Image (cartoon, rainbow, N blue to C red):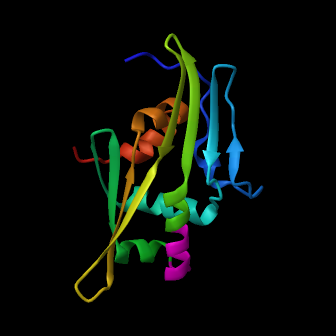
């Protein structure tokens, strides 16, 4: 596997700062690497949801994907001011977020499109919300673009 170009790391949590309300934001890094946040309308609500899931959930990693599972009770106890409707909207926005990356290496121009967040809500037989599962794919791309700060949160207290 070819090594990706060295870059100045981006701040992962800047993806949640979309006060400009643009559908896509270009955050080009250097002449060899360009990054576009697509469907980038993420706010502090999504950041709080992300933090709660990854700070209090049961985590595991397999096949380049980190997964965190959190009970509905635990989630709602850490987001008491959040309505179910607000929670669903935040989940939908996180699910649509993606990053487009283009970089040059010895093979030429390499392009990739990465949908990072997979979110599943679990319900019991009475259709009552019981748990939330968030998967984050492409950990190698996340580590390359964003560095160790986000990786510590994703992999802290992990079960393999």
Q: Position of residue 119 (x, y in %)?
A: 40, 61
Question: Measured along the vertical axis of the image, is residue 130 above or below residue 151?
Answer: below
Q: Quadrant of residue 121?
A: bottom left
**Residue at the image point whose x is 36% and y is 75% from the top:** 72
Q: Is 57 situated left or right of 18 in this image?
A: left
**Residue at the image point whose x is 74% and y is 58% from the top:** 21
Q: Residue furthest right?
A: 20
Q: Is residue 123 visible?
A: yes
* Main secondary structure along the magenta-highlighted residues: helix
**Residue at the image point whose x is 51% and y is 79% from the top:** 80
Q: Which quarter of the figure is the C terminus placed in?
A: top left
Q: Position of residue 48 (x, y in %)?
A: 54, 63
Q: Residue furthest bottom?
A: 126
**Residue at the image point whose x is 46% and y is 72% from the top:** 78
97 in the magenta segment: no
Give the residues in magenta.
80-90
88 in the magenta segment: yes
Q: Nearer the viewer, residue 121 or 150?
A: 121
Q: Position of residue 11 (x, y in %)?
A: 61, 40
Q: Residue furthest top?
A: 106
Question: Measured along the vertical axis of the image, is residue 129 above or below residue 75?
Answer: below
Q: Is 32 situated left or right of 3 in this image?
A: right
């Amino acid at each position: 596997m070819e090594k990706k170009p060295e870059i100045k790391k981006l701040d992962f949590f800047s993806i949640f700062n979309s006060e400009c309300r643009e559908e896509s934001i270009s955050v080009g890094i250097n002449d060899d690497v360009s990054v576009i946040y697509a469907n980038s309308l993420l706010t502090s609500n999504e950041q709080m949801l992300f933090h709660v899931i990854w700070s209090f959930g049961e985590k595991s990693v397999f096949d380049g994907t980190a997964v965190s599972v959190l009970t509905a009770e635990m989630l709602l106890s850490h987001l008491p001011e959040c309505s179910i409707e607000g929670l669903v909207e935040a989940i939908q926005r996180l699910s649509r977020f993606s990053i487009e990356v283009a970089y040059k290496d010895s093979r030429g121009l390499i392009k990739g499109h990465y949908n990072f967040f997979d979110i599943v809500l679990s319900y019991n037989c009475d259709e009552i919300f019981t748990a939330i599962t968030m998967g984050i794919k492409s950990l190698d791309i996340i580590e390359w673009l964003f560095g160790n700060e986000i990786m510590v949160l994703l992999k802290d207290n992990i079960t393999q």
